[in-house]
Image (tube, rainbow, N blue to C red):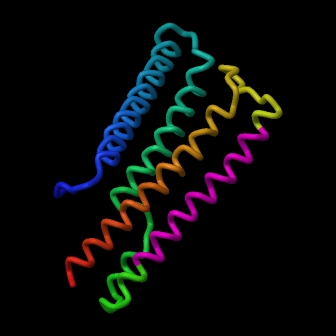
């Protein structure tokens, strides 16, 4: 992949996102390994391991979705945009990018409503008994990051299209 010139804040985001996803997936792997070891070797299970692995996976998926937005890995309208005449490509790219950002913001706001209910009701996770809103915070966190990354990717696509003309 060619090196992109980008703002320093995006460089920091790249490093933080990659580190978090690596740590979460590594932690999930360790927890699942421990569960298998305890279940089949020690003949006893860890009651919290499945839940923790699930929450690690959820957080990794939502942070990873931001990485996917940056890389253009999400379902998009590229195929449609590529068939458009050059005069319409810029507008279609802009509309697709803005819709992606708006979708991310909408999901973020709706997830905050769910989190508010979880905080109000005091719901806790069954095995670890941590507040459930900690697990659900992955949704708005990922959506904020995705919104920023969709915006970044749209700007990069528009710059690339400008260079083609």
Give the left or right position of residue 45, taking residue 162 as reference.
right
Give the left or right position of residue 73, taking residue 98 as reference.
left
Magenta residue span = 93-117
Q: Quadrant of the N terminus?
A: bottom left
Give the left or right position of residue 3, taking residue 75 as reference.
left
Residue 97, quarter of the rendered image: bottom left
Vertical placement of residue 106 versus 133, above or below:
below
Q: Residue at x 51, y 47 (%)?
A: 142
Q: Residue at x 61, y 52 (%)?
A: 108
- In magenta stretch: residue 66: no
Q: Residue at x 58, y 14 (%)?
A: 45
Residue 66, horizontal then vertical, whole percent = 43, 50
Residue 26, horizontal then vertical, whole percent = 38, 28
Q: Residue furthest right?
A: 121
For the stretch drawn in magenta, the main secondary structure is helix
Q: Residue at x 33, y 91 (%)?
A: 87
Q: Residue furthest left?
A: 2
- In magenta stretch: residue 110: yes
Give the left or right position of residue 133, taking residue 27 as reference.
right
Residue 122, quarter of the rendered image: top right
Residue 113, horizontal then vertical, whole percent = 74, 47
Q: Quadrant of the C terminus?
A: bottom left
Nearer to me, 49 or 125: 125
Nearer to me, 162 or 60: 162
Vertical placement of residue 47 versus 70, above or below:
above
Vertical placement of residue 23 versus 115, above or below:
above
Q: Residue furthest top?
A: 42
Vertical placement of residue 120 versus 158, above or below:
above
Nearer to me, 113 or 78: 113
Residue 56, horizontal then vertical, whole percent = 51, 32
């Amino acid at each position: 992949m060619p090196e992109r010139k980008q703002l320093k804040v995006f460089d920091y985001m790249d490093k933080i996102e990659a580190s978090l996803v690596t740590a979460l997936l590594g932690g999930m792997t360790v927890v699942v390994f421990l569960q298998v070891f305890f279940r089949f070797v020690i003949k006893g299970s860890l009651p919290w391991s499945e839940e923790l692995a699930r929450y690690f996976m959820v957080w990794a998926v939502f942070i990873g979705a931001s990485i996917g937005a940056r890389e253009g890995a999400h379902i998009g309208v590229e195929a449609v945009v590529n068939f458009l005449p050059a005069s319409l490509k810029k507008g279609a790219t802009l509309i697709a990018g803005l819709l992606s950002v708006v979708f991310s913001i909408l999901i973020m706001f709706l997830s905050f409503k769910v989190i508010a209910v979880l905080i109000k009701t005091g719901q806790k996770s069954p095995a670890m008994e941590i507040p459930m809103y900690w697990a659900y915070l992955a949704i708005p966190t990922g959506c904020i990051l995705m919104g920023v990354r969709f915006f970044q990717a749209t700007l990069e696509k528009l710059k690339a299209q400008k260079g083609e003309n």
